Amino acid sequence: MAMEEVLPLAQLQAVRGGPLYLKLKNMIEDAVVSGRLKHGDALPAERDIADEAAISRVTVRKAIDDLVDQGLLVRRRGSGTFVVKPVPRMQQPLTRLTSFSEDMRRRGMVPGSRWLDRGIFDPTSEETMTLGLSGTARVCRITRLRTANDMPIALERTSLADDMLPDPDVVENSLYQALAQRNIRPVRANQRICAVLLKDEETELLGVPPGSAALSVQRIAYLDSGRVMEVSTALYRSDAYDLVAELTIGA
């Protein structure tokens, strides 16, 4: 579909009612809601919008600023302005130990991964201590952008001893599934949850506005022997995830 069909900017002046910035805002919002503009689509440059609609760039900037504040658009430095599809909120119970892939399938969604980094490395001092590594052991690290129905949901960084996973390339979508094929399964985990502000590169990967907050979930999972299986940190989009815990009153 041609851009003039998606955004009939030349007709903006003829639209009745309200200031020009509001007319432009409503036109862009309608294109997103109707599906003419889809998640990830780039808007024309502000200068081009202003020229086509015969309005000032200040007016264009005001309309786009409002849509960025609403979360329908996101600015990416050096790249432009892009559509952000609203994400349905999901509740994650904290009383059940599941993998991301298992959790998404349970919701009827298709889990996916975009690999950012994976390999066998010399451990940091923190990894050596937390994973209980010997002096010669190395660490397997995997970093992924996790998706559900092709939508970015979380950034996940995981470390585990290299004898748990000698070849990280065997992991397709589910780390836990790859480990289960080696008869390695977690039986319990400790999780620490806090709110954090995302870095610029993290907001670009997750497709959220700069300065957005996320839920940081730090997990240490254990085998039935008591050995630490993995240490992971996941940054979940705060507009997509609610973490829920059920509490009971003791006698």
Image (cartoon, grey):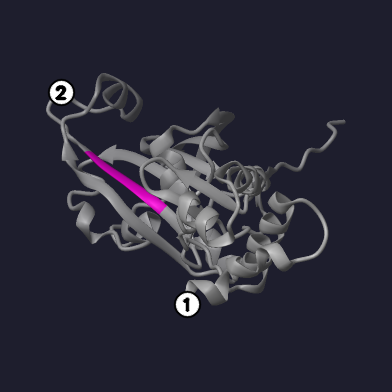
Within-10-Å neighbours for mark 2: few <14, some 14–19, many 20+: few
Per the rendered image, the range of residues in magenta is 140-145
Foreground pick, 95 / 87: 87
In the image, residue 136 sits, relative to residue 17, either above or below, namely above
Q: How many angstroms separate mark 1 from mark 2 (CA)?
A: 61 Å
The amino acid at mark 2 is Gly
The amino acid at mark 1 is Ala
Contact between marks 1 and 2 (CB within 8 A): the answer is no
Residue at the (60%, 73%) spot, across then down: 35
Residue at the (61%, 49%) spot, across then down: 96
Q: Position of residue 234 (x, y in %)?
A: 47, 41
Foreground pick, 207 / 191: 207
Q: Regarding mark 1 in the picture, which secondary structure is present there? A: loop
The quarter of the picture where the C terminus appears is: top right
**Residue 230 among magenta residues:** no
Q: Which mark is residue 102?
A: none
Choose the circle earlier in sequence order: 1 or 2. 1
Residue at the (26%, 19%) spot, across then down: 125
The residue labelled by disc 1 is 2
- The image quarter in which residue 202 lies: top left
Residue at the (63%, 47%) spot, across then down: 239
The residue labelled by disc 2 is 135
Q: Nearer the viewer, mark 1 or mark 2?
A: 1
